[in-house]
Amino acid sequence: MNQQQFIEDTVAKQLKPKSEIPDFSVGDTLNIHMRIVEGDKERIQIYQGVLIAQKGRGADQTITVRRIVANEGVERIFPVHSPRIAQIEVVRRSDARRAKLFYLRDRTGKSRRLRDQRRGLKHVQDEITVPGSEQQEAPEASAQAAK
């Protein structure tokens, strides 16, 4: 086993499986569940904010999440594959046309909001219910019940 193969195997052991990391992109609002150790106790703390940048890949992949606390912007960089991160969940998907959203640092008020993503939701794994689809199914079900 050469040195390159040894390094690749060691890094592969440290990566989280793809099922644990959701598909997110820049502009999405994320809940990041972090493990906090206080003495001999461990608890989960949730950090919610807008994903403004992604960097790296593999074990070096990091995300920058920005939130507003007491009218001050707070940014935090998280290593995606860190064992301190218990879970990452997508709260809201937004449409961003840039790879990095650093311009949000200068914005306040309504101009800071991002537009909801309305098109291209193929990568969302949650079921999307279309209004009125339940009404179309109900007559078919009642017709089958009448027979």
Image (spheres, rainbow, N blue to C red):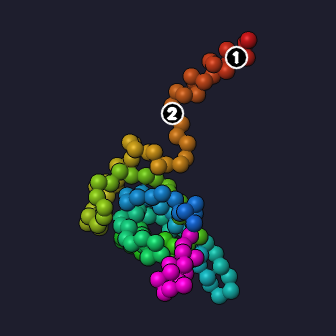
* Mark identifier at residue 130: 2
State which tag comes first along the sequence, 2 or 1: 2
Describe the element under mark 2 as helix, strand or loop: loop
Q: Please give the residue where the numbered disc 1 appears in the rendered image.
A: 144
Q: Nearer the viewer, mark 2 or mark 1?
A: 1
Residue at image coords 54%, 28%: 133
Q: Position of residue 1 (x, y in %)?
A: 54, 84
Q: Is residue 15 magenta?
A: yes
Q: Could you tell me if residue 140 is visible in this image?
A: yes
Above or below: residue 132 compared with residue 6: above
| In magenta stretch: residue 131 | no
Disc 2 residue type?
Val
List the single residue furthest toward the front: 1
Instruction: Please state the horizontal and vertical placement of residue 143, each as a whole percent of the image.
Output: 67, 14
* Above-or-below relation of 92 to 143: below
Within 10 Å of disc 2 (Cα), the crowding (few <14, some 14-19, many 20+) is: few
| Residue at image point 63% right, 22% down | 138
Give the tally of numbered discs: 2
Q: Where residue 63 sits: x, y (%)?
A: 42, 70
- Disc 1 residue type? Gln
Mark 1 and mark 2 in contact (Cβ < 8 Å)? no
Say above or below: 122 vs 3: above
Q: Using the image as rendered, state which of residue 41 and residue 3 is in the foreground.
A: 3
Question: What is the quadrant of residue 134 in the picture?
Answer: top right
Label 1: few (<14), some (14–19) or many (≥20) C-alpha neighbours in 10 Å: few
**Residue 135 lies in quadrant:** top right
Specify the quadrant of the image occupied by residue 14: bottom right
What residue range appears in magenta?
1-16
Q: CA distance from mark 2 to mark 1?
A: 23 Å
Q: Main secondary structure of the magenta part?
A: helix
